[in-house]
């Protein structure tokens, strides 16, 4: 659109750097060979990295601001699943070209989410290449209090935040040519679904509130069955999910897409909700902690001895996921 002057590497870094500020826990930020960070005493450092590639992790037509948001969101979601307070992040950009408009829009989405969660950008790398965005996010937890995948025990409840499956439904609609990811949808229900895909909400406050309550946690990036399967594998237990207990999407119902939603919700990824387990004795504490942070949480099943994840209705097992992946129609 129009003639945009391409930025050189240093102009680009400067455009990003000017959005960052000074902080007591950053002795040295962007501009040197590396950053110097000041963790708080008694805290463990929580570190995670995630890369998004154009055409693989988001449609090529996705607006730059949405890409900026999502690049950080998927990393904050991993910190949330550990119960960590976000602190710092780095950003590695591989860009085919560097138009100031694209970089500013990307930064707008990225920093909207970064500022909301108090995570500071402290460095990164900038190269020319196919569009690819990589973040390393760092957070802190009081030593020994992180939420892990290996703590689920037989008898624990299984919970999930939000409504898993909405982002997957939006992606399916885009693949079918029913949803344009490059602009807001006119229809309110469709727009709600598009935002679930374009601007997922990392459940950082929920993760913090679940410290000392949840026995295990994971974020739902690859689908409920698959990600809950990671908890089961690491905890050496089985999960029973009750189909009638799974959250229903009002956006899907209003839009008349309930059947499509039901078909997706257990296996579709990209929601970045938290799935966690907690002792049945702490049910009220889970409800209270989630209402304190204004996050919807639904009890969807229970942990038992055994292995794999099993989704049931009144008639029997609908879907199972074991170590080898999915079996959509078990015999
Ligand atoms: P070096 O060549 O020593 O790695 P660079 O010229 O790549 O240094 O980077 C200069 C400074 O800018 C460093 O502090 C680096 O962390 C920071 N930086 C580079 N790219 C980005 C980026 N995309 N986002 C944030 N900081 C960046
Ligand atoms: Mg470098």
Image: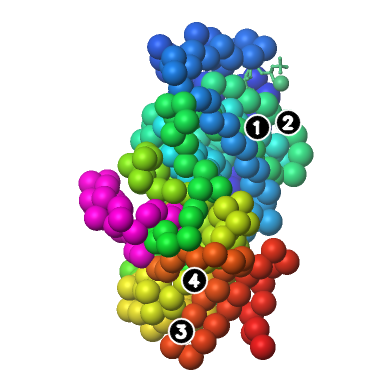
Residue of label 4: 240
Residue 42: percent from the left, percent from the top?
44, 18
Quadrant placement of the C terminus: bottom right
Question: Callout 4: 10 Å neighbours few (<14), some, many (20+)?
Answer: many
Q: Which numbered mark, 4 or 3, is in the foreground of this view? A: 4
Q: CA distance from mark 2 to mark 3?
A: 51 Å
Does the numbered disc 1 mark a residue whose Cβ is under 8 Å from ligand 1?
yes
Distance of label 1 from label 3 (alpha carbons): 45 Å
How is the rendered protein coloured?
A: rainbow
Q: CA distance from mark 4 to mark 2?
A: 46 Å
Queried whether the magenta region covers residue 186, the answer comes back as no
Give the labeled residue for mark 1.
Answer: 92
Disc 2, SS: strand
Question: Residue reaching furthest bottom?
Answer: 315
Q: Nearer the viewer, mark 4 or mark 2?
A: 4
Q: Does residue 254 appear left or right of residue 119 in this picture?
A: left
Question: Up-down: is 242 above or below 70?
Answer: below
Query: What whole-number distance in Å separates the C-alpha atoms at marks 4 and 1?
Result: 40 Å
Depth check: give the residue in front, 153 or 57. Answer: 153
Task: Answer few, some or many: residues within 10 Å of disc 1's Cα (few below 14, many 20 plus, some between 14 and 19).
Answer: some
As rendered, which of 248 and 324 lies closer to the eye?
324
């Amino acid at each position: 659109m129009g003639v945009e002057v391409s930025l050189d590497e240093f102009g680009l870094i400067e455009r990003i750097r000017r959005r960052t500020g000074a902080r007591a826990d950053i002795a040295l930020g962007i501009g040197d060979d590396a950053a110097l960070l000041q963790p708080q005493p008694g805290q463990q450092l929580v570190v995670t990295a995630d890369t998004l590639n154009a055409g693989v992790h988001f449609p090529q037509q996705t607006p730059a601001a949405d890409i900026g948001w999502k690049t950080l969101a998927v990393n904050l979601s991993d910190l949330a699943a550990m119960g960590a307070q976000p602190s710092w992040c780095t950003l590695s950009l591989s860009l085919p070209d560097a138009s100031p408009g694209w970089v500013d829009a990307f930064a707008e989405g990225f920093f909207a989410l970064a500022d909301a969660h108090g995570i500071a950008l402290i460095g990164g790398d900038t190269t020319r290449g196919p569009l690819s965005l990589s973040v390393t996010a760092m957070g802190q937890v009081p030593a020994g209090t992180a939420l892990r995948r290996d703590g689920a025990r037989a008898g624990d409840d299984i919970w999930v935040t939000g409504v898993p499956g909405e982002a997957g439904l939006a992606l399916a609609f885009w693949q079918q040519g029913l949803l344009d990811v490059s602009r807001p949808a006119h229809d309110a229900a469709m727009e709600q679904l598009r935002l679930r895909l374009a601007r997922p909400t990392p459940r950082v406050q929920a993760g913090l509130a679940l410290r000392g309550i949840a026995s295990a946690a994971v974020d739902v990036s690859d689908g409920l069955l698959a990600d809950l399967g990671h908890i089961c594998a690491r905890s050496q237990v089985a999960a029973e999910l009750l189909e009638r207990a799974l959250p229903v999407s009002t956006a899907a119902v209003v839009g008349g897409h309930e059947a499509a939603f039901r078909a997706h919700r257990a296996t579709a990824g990209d929601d970045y909700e938290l799935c966690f387990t907690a002792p049945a004795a702490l049910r009220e504490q889970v409800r209270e902690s989630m209402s304190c942070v204004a996050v919807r949480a639904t009890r969807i099943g229970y942990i038992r001895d055994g292995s794999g994840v099993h989704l049931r209705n009144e008639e029997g097992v609908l879907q199972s996921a074991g170590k080898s992946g999915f079996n959509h129609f078990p015999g």
